Image (cartoon, grey):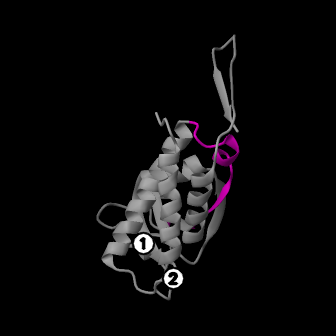
Amino acid sequence: MIVESSYWKLPLIESAKKFEELEELCELSERHFVQIEQDIFLGFYTIRKLIDASKITDKLKNKKIVLKSHPNKDKYVTLLNNHKLDEKYDFSVLNSEQRDLWFIASRLIHSYIFQISINDMGIFDGVLFTSDIDKTKKLYWLTSQEIISIFQEVGSNEVTKFEWSIDPESGQETMVAS
């Protein structure tokens, strides 16, 4: 259980600042790639834990975020070929769907494929990922701007009120954080 969430949220804001700086660099070193990977994995793990501990508001937890994806064009995605993204996914097609934070964080944490996305100018512009569940369906793309926005929003989100109730018939508990 997370007791004091500010210690978990501050690194999200710091990571968002680092990502903004990396968007300005035309050449990323191996160290930059490792730092991006660590910040994204730890950041989205943190977001999942904050959601599970009711340390962000329900409004933010339930907010729908546009998640882009490229459809799979070869159902056989394995550990031996999961680096051949151009062969496995159709980059000429870009679909969109709306998903909540828990979904996005879960897919990133449990990613089967995770690759940092670099644009034509060599600048960090997001991450490509898919889970074992989705690998034969689609490859998600989350832009660096969306990651920055998510980290800033979660990092600055404050719960000021809890409402708790229990259904006397079913024993089902309900907690609303606002």
Residue 48 in the figure: left or right of residue 57: left
Q: Which kind of residue does numbered mark 1 sit on?
A: Leu
- The residue lying furthest to the left in this view is 80
Secondary structure category for the residue under label 1: helix
Q: Which kind of residue does numbered mark 2 sit on?
A: Glu
Q: Position of residue 158 (x, y in %)?
A: 64, 45
Alpha carbons under labels 2 and 1: distance apart: 25 Å
Q: Residue at x 34, y 80 (%)?
A: 29
Q: Is 85 located above or below residue 150 in the figure?
A: below
- The residue lying furthest to the top in this view is 169
For label 1, the residue is 85
Q: Residue 69: within the magenta?
A: yes
Q: Residue at x 42, y 56 (%)?
A: 41
State which region is magenta. Answer: 54-72
Residue 145 in the figure: left or right of residue 116: right
Q: Nearer the viewer, residue 67 or 28?
A: 28
Secondary structure category for the residue under label 2: loop
Q: Nearer the viewer, residue 51 or 93?
A: 51
Q: Residue 153: within the magenta?
A: no
Q: Are marks 2 and 1 in contact (CB under 8 Å)?
A: no
Instruction: Find residue 30 and name its label.
Output: none
For label 2, the residue is 24
Q: Position of residue 170 (x, y in %)?
A: 65, 14
Q: Position of residue 63 (x, y in %)?
A: 68, 50
Q: Position of residue 161 (x, y in %)?
A: 69, 34
